[in-house]
Image: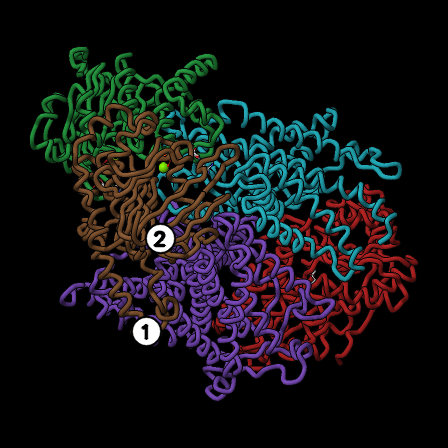
Chain colours: A green, B cyan, C purple, D brown, E red
Amino acid sequence: MTNASKATARPLLEVQGIDVFYGAIHAIHGLSVIVNEGEIVTLIGSNGAGKTTALGAISRLLPIRSGDVLLDGRSLGSVPPHDVVRLGLAHVPERRRIFADLTVTENLEMGAFTVRSTADIASRMDEMFELFPRLAERRKQFGGTLSGGEQQMLAVARALMQRPRILLLDEPSMGLSPLFVERIFDIIETINKRGVTILLVEQNAHMALAIASRGYVLKNGMIVDQGSGARLRSDESIQAAYLGAH
Amino acid sequence: MSFQLALELLPPTLADGLILGLLYATIALGYTMVYGVLGLINFAHSEIFMVGAVVAVELLTYVLAGSSLHPVAQLVLAMIVAAAVSAALAGLAERIAYRPLRRSNAPKLAPLITAIGISLFLQDAVRFVESLFGQFIRPFPSMPFFDIPLPLTPNDSVPMKSLVILIVAGAMLAGLRYTVNQTRLGKAIRAVATDRMAASLMGIDVNRIVMLTFLIGGALAGVAGTLYALQFGRVDPFSGFIPGLKAFTAAVLGGIGSIPGAMVGGIVLGLIEMLIGTFVPILTNNAIGTEYKDIFAFGILILILIFKPTGLLGRPSTEKV
Amino acid sequence: MAPGFPKRSVWLIAYTLAVTLLCVFVFTGNGLIDTAAFLALLVPLFIASDFDKCDPRVGMPVFAFVLLCALPIIGMRNTFYLDVAIQVGIFAVLALGLNIVVGFAGLLDLGFIAFFAVGAYLWAIVSSPHGAALLGVGFPLQGDAFFVVAVAAVFVAAGTGALLGLPVLRLKGDYLAIVTLGFGEVIRVLANNLDKPVNITNGPQGIAAIAQPLTEVAGALATTTAPAFKWQALIYYAVVLTLVLVAVLANRRLDSSSIGRSWLAIREDEIAAQAMGIPLVRTKLIAFATGAAFAGTMGVLFAAKQTFVSPESFDFNQSIGVLAMIVLGGLGSIRGVMMGAGLVTILNLQVLKSLSAGLNHLRATGFEIFGWSFANLPTQFEPSKYERLIFGLILIAMMLYRPRGLVPAQRRPISAKNAGRVS
Amino acid sequence: MTGDLLLDVASLRKSFGGLTAVDDVTLQVERGSIVSVIGPNGAGKTTFFNLITGIYRPDLGTALLDGVDLVGLRPDQVAAAGLARTFQNIRLFAGMTALENVLVARSMHMRSGYWGALFHTRVYADQERSAVADASELLRFVGLAERADALAGSLAYGEQRRLEIARALATKPKLLLLDEPSAGMNPQETEDAKALILRIRSELGIAVVLIEHDMRLVMTVSDHIVVLDYGRKIAEGGADDIRTHPKVIEAYLGRGVAARTATPESEEAS
Amino acid sequence: EDKGTIKIVTQSPLSGQQSVAGEGIMLGAQLAVAQFGKQLTDMGFQLSLQPEDDQATPNVGVANANRILNDPAVLGVVGHYNSGVAIPSSEVYAKDNLVMVSPANTNPAITDRETTRAIANRICGRDDIQGPAGANFAMDTLKAKKVYIINDKSAYGSGIAQTFEAAARKNGANVILSTGMDQNETDFSSILNRARVDQPDLIYYGGTYPQGGLIIKQMRQKGLKAAFLGGDGLDSGDLQKIAGPENMTNAYFTTTALPLSQMPAAAAFAQTYKAKFNKDPEVYSAYGYDSARVVIEAIVAAAKAKGGTMPSRAAVAEAVRGVKFDGVTGAIAFNNRGDIASAKYVVIEAGKSADANKIVKIIDVAAPGGS
Ligand SMILES: Nc1ncnc2c1ncn2[C@@H]1O[C@H](COP(=O)(O)OP(=O)(O)OP(=O)(O)O)[C@@H](O)[C@H]1O
Ligand SMILES: Nc1ncnc2c1ncn2[C@@H]1O[C@H](COP(=O)(O)OP(=O)(O)OP(=O)(O)O)[C@@H](O)[C@H]1O
Ligand SMILES: CC(C)C[C@H](N)C(=O)O
Ligand SMILES: [Mg+2]
Ligand SMILES: [Mg+2]
């Protein structure tokens, strides 16, 4: 199921030895990650390993103490957070962060904030409603009153509205029904096939490793292992630690 | 009270109440927009309003007085400059006193203190500058055009200025409503208001939007200041306080953060104040005088909030458990 | 805590003694030198009260020495400093009361001074000739009834707080703020207007000739160098000191108790707090009433000390002033809140005044700097006219410099050992 | 179902505007049992919790906990009646330490709160000490002993989930409602969560109602499973009934999951 | 030789809306110190004037008073502007017999309280005469029957309005409305709309000129032709500026101060004032000037009585009651309660500008109750 073969070797995102702190707490130690154009790369690790922190640092939500993040060879160090989107990087954050006081439609419009053509926005929105029919049913509802899973769909859809080149996903399957978990992984693969590079953080490590070309294993803010999805999936110690007893 | 008396008093009272309410509404918008975006009560807004009023009066008195421009043109010119100055000041306040606090993750109330600091500073700074040129209590120059009576009822009239205020304030409010509901800017403002971090993830420059919010609110305050001076005839460095307080009250009454709410709240408050000020002494045969109008106004406010805890037009929070 | 006495302690003690002696011998009456000396005496208070950095075995005695010895001695030489200390004390207790409401429970109260007014008018009415005319036989109460009324004020103010709180505490955040603001204004306007039809508050004229407690004692102690009014001030100082102590104790104990945690929980997340079994309105009401009780008691003291109350003393700016103290000091931090109260009060009463008096002096004497004489200062630059402008700038600067307050609040980890054991 | 009825919910209904989020749902929980509520996203599961915990008021229906009518009670009264819960979107007191979070939930059981604290009575001090001891014990129970003094907001997502459970347990409930406790946990951690849920029943004797999308967890711990779709109950029964129930597969599980969770593990649940 | 420092303090609002008047008092006092201080410096004392800002707020005034009280060099206070501030502050001065000479406080309570009997003095008139004087004028000269009374809810404004109302009712006036209107309000339309129906003959205002001017302006703009009358709070050159000259018809006020232009000694005063401060004197500048002079004269007398050494505060307070001179504002001498022995009460018809003010009537009345 891997599409590693499809990936060109050109690195789209390069994380070069970054350190991230929360006050005095050293949450990420010299993290280096490379995501090549067209790849799906996954970060796995237990609770508190630093996955969310890593994504936050990449999309410039969190300050980096040292090290650098390159997008397409260009350092993001001096790019203000809101301009990262314009460079083609979208981030579906932990806890979804949807706009509670805006309707589903408005939330999606916000996702396409950088787009000016209304026709373009409309067509993208139709596309999203197709991918997430549940959202279509809830168009006029305020984001804040959606069910947990509906919010999760909205968060993903909103990021996709940006038509990013690279998408950072923080636990996109969280709170989704089993049927929809499968669906969301299908969606991830689909958009990846359409050329979107993906950096995926998932607790559902089984499925994440199944669709990923490569994976990194994070522990206490450090990378302790990396390799192809298939290799990691079959690694016994990883199975024991992250994939459950069997 | 005779029915006849009430009939005679009602039209001018409503007219004056409406004008007062529109002024409150225009100021209240500045509070509500900043509140909506930052959750911050910008207590310095009343002084920003005051500066606008002072600037307009100065211009009309010393610069435009001799010109051959039509009084309305003079007023509009003064208003534009006042709006610009007030907007600049509001922007400056945001840049100097609020933004640094946001960055350092200060508690929600911290900007309240810098706001008070700005208020005190502006009051005395304006007093200083004004007293360099004479007294700091500034009367609105006499412009007979604005006093031309317009018939309201067969035996009652309102001055021209009431019409002018109605039109200008009404237009400002309508324009703002359009901007916030229909434009990209408006959408960005609403996004920033709900979740700053998420807005930034959408590619919205949060600081820029916040700044724009202050600029718009400041400009409205400048306009309101000009109209206020026109209506009541006097400004001084301390005349921002009361209207500011009232406008803030109006914003809450309407539902803080809600733009139509600020408008409705302002108008309701203006009407309540005027009606109570006029009719309560009559109804109680002077036992309760006009001085009680604030008690009634706040009493009504409290009642409304008890039954409608998020103000007249404020939506209940959409947070889902 | 440090095991031995660190070297800093020696310095602290030496400094305290030196400044005290200097104050006692150098004090001239008024002016910049005295202000500086007085401020220098406050430094040990600041250091000694920080038990994290300063060994309490040294800190406590130094603290007690300054409050119980040095300040009273200096205060008797110049009662203004006693008066400053009393004012600081009054505002410190007010701030501690508001701290419970805003700092602990997170309820923004913009009309806090109303409860202060309730206490002040309570004492004013029962102990003045004006009140006697209103209440009839048995009034006015003698000055010594002060202590009884002060205790009664705790309940009267708490009751007022509860009465207001009951309908409005369901309101969220800033809606509550505006309602309390309105309530504060209502109380002030009532005080200003209740001179007719029945004259209760004497309206804008205010109530004068309010009785003071323990006047016989002050009278008996009077000598030519220390006239009765100085002893009276000392009595107030003692009363205030006691009340501050009580207030601090109450704040600390409540903060670290289950009710304190409930307040914090409500502040953090009302829904979750409720789901964990915390009754929302009742818990908020307790905060509101407790804060009000603090203010009410201080109101009684304020009225007695001023011997005059009028509505102007209780306007919105006063409420904002107390709020400024607690935010400036550090919301929720007891030590910070008290420092905020001290800082704002001393700044306003003394530092700014001394500054403008100093500048004025320079002007009067024609002091020259770089060949430019202060005598040329135009009247627009009259320094005493710009105290509030400078105060405004100081507020901004301090907040920018210390956004979380002078002494930011810190959650202290509770360990099984020190649980339930707060002094 | 036999035995001792703890929670008895009948014909519960709630609409939001035109949408009926919970439609005539009936549910019974026996003392000492673990019941799961599953269903597609937006089926009304969380709303169901909100209805019986006093967050929303049902339009119709009754809910009795041990004979106490829960309808119309405030959330704190519901908690006092012995019903505790966690939230799908974690709602911790972020600025308080983990230990304090748990202690807050103990307030309800502390007498002599206000005056005791003010006058520092012996009873109060003893209570406070035992509360801290209990709370620490609960933190140990969920595996957060080391994080006792960390601010709740600084914990990682999975840790926060466990802290929420500890906090809910501190109210000494008869019945615990868990809304997706394993969301954000990897399979290994989910195993731990499963063990935790079982220990809540076996060691603390507390019955549990579980909302969960992780079928492996649901199928292995539940005595009884209720399935909602569009607010209505479409199926209920034991794990095996549900796994094979065509409507459930259609609306919720999908064929893949149904197949994957078909391993005979359900014995573990007992 | 140096016999020590003597300070005279002025307490008046130096910030806030009333700071114009407050500054006038302070500058007047400064001029007096400059002109008459020589007597003291010649005796070997250092003399200085210490201006204090009471912010027109009782709390601030009292706090200042406490500070001043503890500066032994301070022997006298010139102040305040607002009766509401002077009353509580003088309670503090009385604790240590520090004398207060008020340039402007007309409220009866200033000198009527037992507690401050020894130290409170004023060189202006009293509202229990000024109010009735206004009422008499309104009834007799203006022939007003239907009357509106508004006060600004300050100690001063409500006090004078009360005395006016009582006297007016006694004279048979029909008081249709008597109401307060907070001093910060700028919108009088709720009252004036009603006046358009009631058509009173007179609107009386107990308050100060910033609002008084506005009432006149808003009255005339609403087409109300009724007479307007107020007390000394309206006595300011800015009244006309705020009301607008075109609106200044049928407007009067009573005051206890002759217009400067009418005072013989005032021309020279105004000239030196202007030369020194580069601005025209305010109405109360001359009163600040004379008040400070009272204090200086009293200190001189007390010092002389003590053989040229530093006098005690009590002695200065006592000496004030013996001071007599012809000041800019008229003959200065006190009765045993601290009231000026004989005050002038002047009714003025306000003109299009302050210079066009016309004196309608001058009444000389001895303060009641004193001797
Ligand atoms: N705001 C914060 N303040 C302090 N520490 C934090 C903060 N947020 C996270 N941490 C700490 O940083 C570390 C990494 O947390 P992070 O949220 O990145 O983990 P994660 O891998 O995403 O875990 P999960 O799977 O539970 O989401 C954890 O130890 C956490 O306690
Ligand atoms: N306050 C509300 N206002 C309007 N609609 C609401 C509100 N609360 C819930 N809903 C709607 O009711 C339906 C049920 O929501 P609920 O949160 O109970 O779903 P759920 O079964 O918990 O789903 P999930 O598994 O995704 O968490 C959803 O469609 C949701 O959008
Ligand atoms: C000038 C006036 C406003 C002062 C007034 N006579 C008073 O006693 O307060
Ligand atoms: Mg995470
Ligand atoms: Mg749910």
Ligand 5 image-quadrant field: top left
Furthest toward the left, the residue is A236
Where does the image place residue A12, in percent across and percent down from the top left?
22, 17
Q: Which residue is drawn at 57% across and 51% down?
A: B306
Q: Quadrant of residue E203?
A: bottom right
Q: Which is nearer the eye, A90 or D60? A: D60
Q: Which chain carries label 2?
A: D
Q: In this view, does C325 lie above or below A5?
A: below
Q: How crowded is mark 2: few (under 14 residues within 10 Å), some or many (20 or more)?
A: many
Q: Which is nearer the eye, B155 or B66? A: B155
Q: Which residue is drawn at 65% across and 38% down?
A: B23
Q: What amino acid is found at the position of numbered circle 1 in the picture?
A: Thr
Q: Which residue is drawn at 20% across and 52% down?
A: D202
* Residue placed under numbered mark 1 in the picture: D121
Where does the image place residue E72, in percent across and percent down from the top left?
49, 73
Q: In this view, does E112 lie to the left or right of A227?
A: right
What is the secondary structure assignment of the residue under circle 1? Answer: loop
What is the secondary structure assignment of the residue under circle 2? Answer: strand
